[in-house]
Amino acid sequence: MELVCPAGNLPSLKAAVDNGADSVYVGFKDDTNARHFAGLNFTERTFKKAVDYAQSRGRKLFVAVNTYPRPSAFPRWKAAVDQAADLGVDALILADMGVMDYAAERWPDLRLHLSVQGSVTTAAGIRLYHEHFGIRRVVLPRVLSVKQVARVIEDSPVPVETFGFGSLCVMVEGRCLLSSYATGRSPNTYGACSPASHVRWEETPDGGTDTRLGGVLIDHFGKDEKAGYPTLCKGRFEVGEHTYYALEEPTSLNTLAILPELQSIGVSAIKVEGRQRSPAYVAQVTAVMRSAIDACLRDPENYSPQDAWMRSLGSVSEGAQTTLGAYHRPWQ
Amino acid sequence: MKLSLGPITYFWERDAVFDFYRAATASPAEIVYLGEVVCSKRRLLKPEDWLTIGRELQQAGKDVVLSTLTLVEAASESSAARHVCENTDFMVEANDASAIQYLSSAGMPFVTGPSVNIYNHRTLSLLSRLGLKRWVLPVELGLEALAELQERRPSGVETEVFAFGRLPLAWSARCYTARSENLPKDDCRFRCLDYPDGRLLSTREGKDFLVLNGTQTQSARTHQALGDLARLRQLGVDVLRISPQSTGTMDVLELFDAVRRGEAVNDLNERLAALAPAGVCNGYLHQQAGMDNEHPNAA
């Protein structure tokens, strides 16, 4: 199983490579990718350095151009594809069919991966992209149980990458409009979910904090509670008589406990989420995932996640807690 | 512009579904989409029931389309979607990539629903080559993007716009209705039946925000394009979609019918408000947050 790690800047990229990532994925400094945050991502100059750093050490560099351009913006997405191809990246991670059609036609030898933002959850869907664009890998959305992932792998014409650790989307990626409903900006078109530009933190008379997104109250924290970032699907809301995390709690996905299962069903690559996170996060998570995958590959029968790994990943998780998410049927 | 009746997104009692489509035969809708698009556990109607309803609507002069499930996860769901795609009676609305693959590889013409990501002309042209006959604009795209897409739309492809209803915003493996009742999805006891228009979610300051509809999340506000019909017509939109609600849907169709004919409608805003229990919105059409309500030009 290949370990695919995130990098939002050069220090993170170095951290990923130095701590054992097989591949690192990055994005350009604009809305052509799904982590379009201020101060993040690569310019042409830093991008060249990234390619050199990874490839000279025998690692692969992937570029995510995984948002959906409208017609007038399409030339910029083409330019992003061309720029990545010109500098010899190992693969492009794409979501939009039109962008994919362009990349396959203009750069027929370049490896294309279908992004999680492509929102494909079935082998038949993968065949669509394989037949028309020759994709060579698919990243599955975080909505399938382990059994369902196994079924997709059995019938898929290309290797499958799944998420192993990081912030958890609870909605099928590429088709979630919750953030755009509240802010007008969506992961699909703008490349950011619950963007900081639309976030407000307000002190309340009780000494607590209200967190808002697009003016909508996402949560209220009491004086003694630690206020969390108002990611729309991780807020507390009222349904009927109850106030609770109606969609999901602040939590991160952690698959350390099921790595042998993922390996035995034939998952080809494990992805770590978090291009928006710090170099320290990337170093820490990459090191743990490297150790865990190596241990699992060496002796899957006797593998069990070490306490130190779990503690380490727990400490960088949302709300300091983790879940198996949809992989584990009772979560659903 | 034609009017379409989108697929029922909620879980209704069997009789309610039959009654609904009986009423639809006499409605001004020219196109009717049928089938379960949200949850494969909702099986009060069998595939044959949908075909029966489809034939009755067809006899009443309606153009009938069968819709596929939006989020396909289990092998049984793939088979069910494939079964719909292989029907020889009606055109199919593909709601995910697998349905597009089944239909295009069989050389069958198809429609794409609002959750198929067509954001640009290149995607539209590609799908047109694969057999696309009509597409629904993704609901988050506004009039500006629509204008750009219409300008470069391939011939032989019709454009449909989601014009009335609670917005389909997200799909998940998790069932939020079951979660709201402290039940696991695998033992959901079909609680969706208790919420024929979904279950309201409000903020902690009591503002209606979203609607939980099983594994789907919708907007609480009702999106409406009535005020923008003139512009939609000018942009060459062919079909306006009305998304079913448990009450008042036929009134919505009548209202849209009157406005598209240019008839003077008294108390338009009041009548709209009465049909939208948590208020209306149209922000998406105006490049704003979807929940916003812009004051558009008069219809």
Image (cartoon, coloured by chain):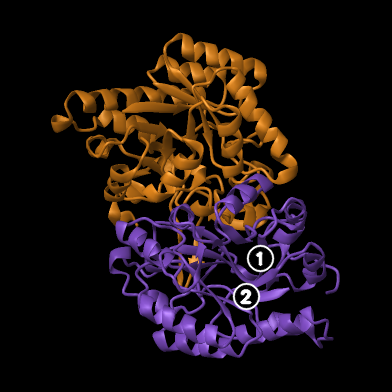
Chain colours: A orange, B purple
Residue toward you, B61 or A59: B61
Q: Does the image show residue A292? A: yes
Q: Label 2: state its secondary structure.
A: strand
Q: Does the image show residue A316? A: no
Q: Is residue B92 left or right of residue B147?
A: left
As drawn, A274 above or below A83:
below
Please state, as top left, top right, bottom left or bottom right, where the N terminus of chain A lies in the image. Answer: top left
Residue drawn at (63%, 70%), measured in percent from left and top? B221
Q: Earlier in the sequence, mark 1 or mark 2?
A: 2
Q: Is residue B78 left or right of residue B34?
A: left
Residue farthest to the left?
A: A301
Q: Which residue was labeled with disc 2?
A: B4
Identified by mark 2, the residue type is Ser
Q: Which residue was labeled with disc 1?
A: B160
Badge 2: chain ID: B
Residue drawn at (34%, 67%), measured in percent from left and top? B182
x, y percent for residue A172: 47, 51
Few, some or many C-alpha atoms within 10 Å of disc 1 (few <14, some 14-19, many ≥20)?
many
Residue toward you, A276 or A213: A276
Res B109 quadrant in image: bottom right
Few, some or many C-alpha atoms within 10 Å of disc 2 (few <14, some 14-19, many ≥20)?
many
x, y percent for residue A159: 36, 35
x, y percent for residue A164: 36, 36
Identified by mark 1, the residue type is Glu
